[in-house]
Amino acid sequence: MVEIAESLVLERPEDKLIQRLSETLSGYLDQERVDDCIRAYQFGAAAHIGQYRKTGEAYICHPIAVAISLAEMRMDADGIMAAILHDVIEDTPVTKKQLAAQFNPEVAELVDGVTKLTKIGSKSQAETQAENVRKMFLAMGNDLRVIMVKLADRLHNMQTLGAMPPEKKRRICRETLDIYAPIANRLGMNSMRHKLEALSFQEMYPRRYAVLNHAVKKARGNRRKVIDTIESSIKNRLHEAGLLGDVSGREKNLYSIYKKMLHKKISLSDVFDVYAFRIFCDSVDTCYRVLGVMHNLYKPIPGRFKDYIALPKANGYQSLHVILMGPYGLPIEIQIRTHEMHRMSESGIAAHWLYKSEDDKCQKFQDRANEWLRDLLEIQKTAGDSLEFIDNLKVDLFPQEVFVFTPKGSIIKLPRGATIIDFAYAVHTDVGNACVSARIDRQLVPLQTRLENGMTIEVITAVWARPNPLWLSYVATAKARSSIRNYLKHFKQLEAINLGRRLLEKELQALHTQLDTIPEARIKILLEVTAMSSFEALLEDIGLGNKMPFLIAKRLLQDDIYANIKLDDGDHSQKSPLVIKGTEGMVINLAKCCRPIPGDSIIGFFNPGKGIVVHHHECRNSNIVRKKHTSWLDVEWSLDAVGDFPAELRIEILNQRGALATIASTISELDSNIENVTVVDQDAHVSVDLITLTVKDRVHLAKIMRRLKELTIVIKITRVKA
């Protein structure tokens, strides 16, 4: 009976798994380090005792399965120990400090990096997930093994997803496809990516997976004869040329087939029209010679050749890709690479542990991964919140590269759809912030120009330039987007502080004093009364229109700062107007209802949170707000106000062919651009149009209106002021 009981104990799933782990570890670690891993198992098993997975097995089976995946990648002992213990901080009373004391600080840091955040308050599911991913990337910045453990953890979770409720299952699959599979791809771990994608696809859409899987197997059988014919032709030609190379038909991944069918809206037969083969060579030189032989065997299709050996992908992937027109008019896709390139493409950063003998060659994967992480950490510092960071991360995880050159010949990789601005920020953040234009192959081009392979780009910068909020609508890289947002956020704050200082100084001058003469003690008391953290914060609030400058000025000068102040009508009329240029940007805005331009009489209104909105004196909207004496102030144009200001004209013209073209050419001759044209009313004889154009000032607008009145097709012309 005792023997039967012992045999039943030995057959526990965790015992089989730990035995398998020990055997795998013994293949590449010394016994002392294997014993350390066994000790980690014993500690983890004790910590997780009484905990079970949805499948019914003891919880410790999951960490051991994760450790086995990493052991097959020849992960070092500390990484294996972290995998075995990766859930103890999250799911048991064990602390990071206890782990560091029991094992070592390195293992404790790795486990903490993988551990999810808990008690994040009343945040949504999306925010909680985003915060966890953000934390993981911060930990990855210190140690890449964190993501290795996390990917192995996710793989085993996907393999045992069957016991989960359908809704949770779909959420986990979506997260895997959105974040973890692309991360594996970005780190060059294609084998891991394909496993995660296949499992996600199978669990999310089981019926689609089953139908597609059956159809692919059937199609594969029908194609066998054609594949054998092409494969033997390739082998014979290589033999004739005296070149060594292994040839194999490339299996298409089910999820890739599904995505292709979905996005290109094509049938399975169209996807399977392309016959795919891989040729493995012994050297890079042989790869290029094989390419020449293949071009002799079958004619290449123009524009369908990619050299990822000379220009590797961002994740380090190297291969030659070419599509040829094969027998029976069938397209053939051929990938040519060395055996080492293939191993690297399957393993990525895991190659660092898998192929210790080739450490120098594996180092480039580590360097690429670290470079990518440095960029991500720079992005996360400037991201407003975790959801914004995740948006930026997703942009960065799906790159289809474009290769462009700097004037000195350096190659820069950018995602497809990238613009000049993305290129400028890729060179340096300061270059991006100061760019005004660019030359592509010595020709001047606008900043929103989309880049194509092989372009040589020279960015033109200016000291006075700054990022434009409109850039956010056409940048493609996460780095450019986060840098622009960060600059604008800080620029608006700085601009608001400067405007707040100008407004407060103006009010104090009207009261016959200056800001510099106000004692520091009075300012401290005022900050206490207004509950502001600093004087800059108070000035920012004034600049954004959240506090009235004349009330703050009165309080500063009043003996009893704590008293409430009421403003008389007469107080406001004695003040000198605030001088503006109209180009201040974010905290001084020109109203779109009346479009004031230099030379107009104007009035400013405080818009809480946004700053000052400047209206024309005759604007109807200004009459309503003018009654609120505390929300408006006198403003006037600076004598040196320069720039292009929008103005709106209402024109009645004869409805003739070419009439609008005549109006447009006349406006263009007078150094003005048309921004918008709206047809308000039209009949057989007359057309009434609203034209928005840019002018320098009132004199410039008057000149344009006079010239337009001289045209025989113009019946009436007026400026719209409200």
Image (tube, rainbow, N blue to C red):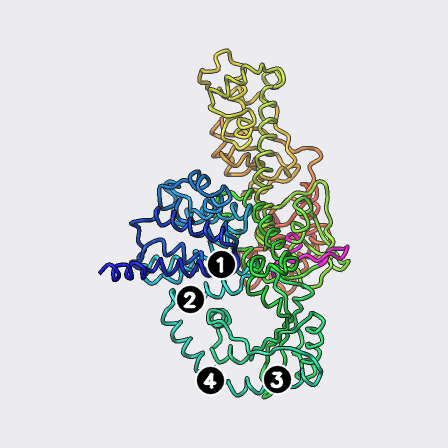
Residue that badge 2 annotates: 201
- What residue did someone put label 1 on? 26
Q: Secondary structure at mark 2?
A: helix
Q: Identity of the amino acid at label 3?
A: Gly
Q: Looking at the picture, does residue 281 appear above or below residue 481?
A: below
Of residues 376 and 402, which is closer to you in this image?
Answer: 376
Q: Position of residue 75 (x, y in %)?
A: 52, 56
Q: Is residue 50 left or right of residue 702?
A: left
Q: Nearer the viewer, mark 4 or mark 1?
A: 1
Q: Residue at x 51, y 35 (%)?
A: 622
Precedes in sequence: disc 3 or disc 1: 1
Q: Amino acid at mark 2?
A: Phe
Q: Which residues are magenta?
A: 405-422
Mark 4 lies on residue: 221
Q: Which residue is mark 3?
A: 326
Residue 432 shown in magenta: no
SS type, badge 3: loop
Q: CA distance from mark 2 to mark 4?
A: 23 Å
